[in-house]
Image (cartoon, coloured by chain):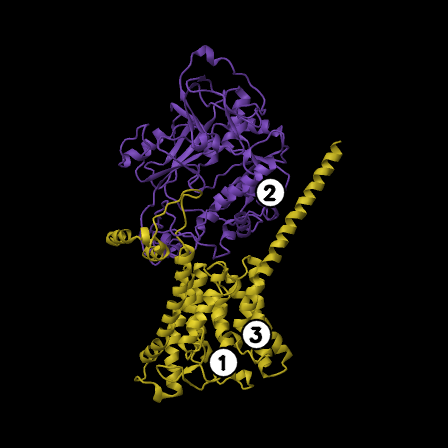
Amino acid sequence: MNMKWLEDWFEKIEPKGKWSWLGSTYEAFHTFAFTPKTVTKSGSHIRDAVDMKRSIIIVVIALIPALLFGMWNIGYQTYTSNPDNFIFQYSIINCWWFGFLRMLPMIAVSYIVGLGIEFAFAQYRHHEVNEGFLATGLLIPMIVPVTTPLWQLALAVAFAVIIGKEVFGGSGMNFLNPALVARAFLFFAYPTHMSGDSVWIANDLWGSDAIAGATPMGQLATGIHPSASALDMLIGTIPGSTCETSVIAIALGAILLLFTGIASWRIMLSVFLGGGAMGLLFNAIGYNDYMQLPFYYHFLMGGFAFGAVFMATDPVTAAQTNCGKWIYGLLIGAFAVLLRVCNPAYPEGMMLSILFMNCMAPLIDHCVVANNIRRRSNRNTLSTQINQRKEASHE
Amino acid sequence: MKTIKIKKGLDIPLDGAAERFVVDMRGVDRYAVKPPDIVGFTPRLLVAEGDTVTAGQPLVEDKNDPRLTLPSPVDGVVEAIVRGEKRKLMEVVVKKELKDLKDLKDLKEPKGLAPEAPVWWMIKERPFGAIANPDHKPKGIYVSLRDTNPLAPDVQFALKGREHEFEAGVKALEAFAPVHCVKAQGPHPAGNIGTIVAALDPINKGEYVWTVNAQDVANIGRWCLTGEYKPERMIAVGGPAAKTPHYYRVICGASLQHISEAQLIDAGYPRLSSSTCETGSTRIISGSPLSGTTVAANGFLGMYDQQVCFIEEGDKYDFMGWLMPGFKKFSFSKTFLSGLLGNLEILDTLGMPRLSYNFNTNVHGSVRPFLFTGSFERVFPFDIYPLQLIKACIVGDVELQEKLGIYEVEPEDFALCEFIDPSKTEIQTIIREALEVLRKEATA
């Protein structure tokens, strides 16, 4: 494909002189269109073809199955709860179209607000605009209830980008997962819009009115056995946050993330192991109905699978050592189930569990690395002793 | 001979491996000694332009230890003294001239290996990869019998016919410390001397090991046997942009002009003259494509290098490179379709060729902070946390660097980390600068 005309156009509009302060913005769009022609100067003369944009776009692609299913499910939930409010003729396509029209403003608000702030910060600091928000900006509307008012969403995105990320220096420097910061902000600032029984199903195509309908976890928290079957939860035809319900769609994304090596299989696996172990432990105790719930229900309900695949594996905020990743994942899974079962005030334990372990990740890494340091220092001492003994025997 | 097995690493499928036939290029007329290639060597010039020199005669000596010298590789006349920024001595160029037979008779009696010997610079010391300090007592001398760098020469092939010299070299080195000749198995960097030392007996603070290229062991042996300083190298010349990749037999420091002409001209490049170093859109690398140095077409072989690589410059835009499927792009990460197809053995069974990748010198992205973790560990066979050590080097925390094992590594050990890094960080530069600070502190 000959894109010479576009190359020339970009070179022509490169901001110079009094416009040079727009450099970051120009650079962001230019590198979006073209991978730069920079060549290596020192060190390795050849480089791997992967870069940050490619890595992040893989995450975005991995989110697409869950996103598409989530859109369909929004329409489906509205139709099954109140067919009169479903303004279209019922069909699979129209369910999806209904959900698409609900999701589009949320995604647009998230990207416009988030990227706007990112560009402003990059411009202010004379940095290049980081790609990280391309994933975060899509994740945020995927983990909130469909009825979340757009102004709340905008506020949450702004809070997440500024307080969750930019104050620490931008992508790669933050210690909390920005998407979960946004959700936690909504959860604590507007609890009535984020939990309960009447936020999960959109009443109609516009507005933040909801039809009553409890999530399986909401039911469990109030002591009712979930009305949805395990199969429903696996497929995802249940009320819940917009795109977190279908374990199958999430699994498709997980396959892509694991095959490309973008997400850590250690974290993903250990979150499920930790959650499963905790679930089995509760089964053994069996004090109440929630504890007696088969352990795999925890994987199917709420945000557990979505969190394990897309949130816990965020490499910036996770533990960075391989050993640390196991500990980090196991504890996320275990804490998530613990919170769900033992604290009905917070039906969704996954978000808090991941945020908590985000805070703990540096400590885990510190301990793992300290172990390596101790091993080296022991080896050092040992070798000094051997050398001294050798010299002594020579004399 | 010992063997070690390494699992972590990556063999980069770079086209243009040297074929096993040898062209003798020992008749080349221009040679250079490059003091900047020798870490820890502060040069003091001993000759002037126009001086007549003999092979083995010191051209420069180390200001800190005058026993250490860099000798002229051939008999001839000092043609040029090339200086760089701040008058730093870059090259001493010697033009070969045949001498009278009676002059050739002197200097030709076998001698032992000593710091004053012209072959001493071939011995390197870890930590820091500096020229071996004769006052140090190394705990071992390591020789790698397999070079796993992309397109690297086959060491056994290069040593063919020089076995007795190699043995003599080993014997001479054994006077200083036990010599370990190690053949590593596994993907790159298995053959790197740093990997070998780390696998057998890692360096602790205050310890030293010496390392010598296998071919230089033979050169040391030749000097010990005959008293003749004739440092030969068999170099592998190749790379995607080389026309006829094969081996050359040269004297150390040889001009690469004839080789460049042979590899580039027929490929449609204008004739090279010694006054120009235009190579069109091809980069010539002396040393490994992962850690070598760029040289001009009329430049010289690096002091320790045993391969020359021709790679196309990648100064071209790539439209939507982050989105395209990428059939011809090589990535360790499997984020391109080539990662899916390139590894399919079904292609072999169907008789279809494996994908060949269009490697060039493009960085393939912009510099970013470290975001992704866990991939460095897959190509870094040390008991060291690479990301943590790199970060300690970036912030200049010397104490933490020591704790994390900086003495066990050299920049080239991080070459693969740098290659696969999606953040495009100049990791080898970071490690080199950190080591330089430590080395200056250690020698001060």
- Against B387, is A87 above or below? below
Residue A73 relative to residue B120: left or right = left
Disc marking residue A337: 3
Residue A82 relative to residue B280: left or right = right
Q: Residue furthest front?
A: A18
Q: Are marks 3 and 2 on the same chain?
A: no
Residue B380 relative to residue A204: left or right = right
Q: Residues within 10 Å of mark 3 (few under 14, many from 20)?
A: many
Instruction: Supply the letter of whichever chain is purple.
Output: B
Residue in the foreground of this view, choosing between B441 and B346: B441
Q: Residue furthest top?
A: B102
Amino acid type, mark 3 = Val
- Measure how far apart labels 1 and 3 are at the Cα level: 18 Å
Q: What residue sits right under mark 2 in the picture?
A: B200
Instruction: Supply the letter of whichever chain is yellow.
Output: A
Residue in the foreground of this view, choosing between A177 and B215: A177
Q: Residue at x 67, y 48 (%)?
A: A378
Which element type, helix, strand or loop, lies under badge 3?
Answer: helix
Quarter of the rendering containing residue B233: top left
Residue A34 relative to residue A232: left or right = left
- Against A8, is A225 above or below? below
Which element type, helix, strand or loop, lies under badge 1?
Answer: loop
Q: Are marks 2 and 1 in contact (CB under 8 Å)?
A: no
Q: Residues within 10 Å of mark 1 (few under 14, many from 20)?
A: many
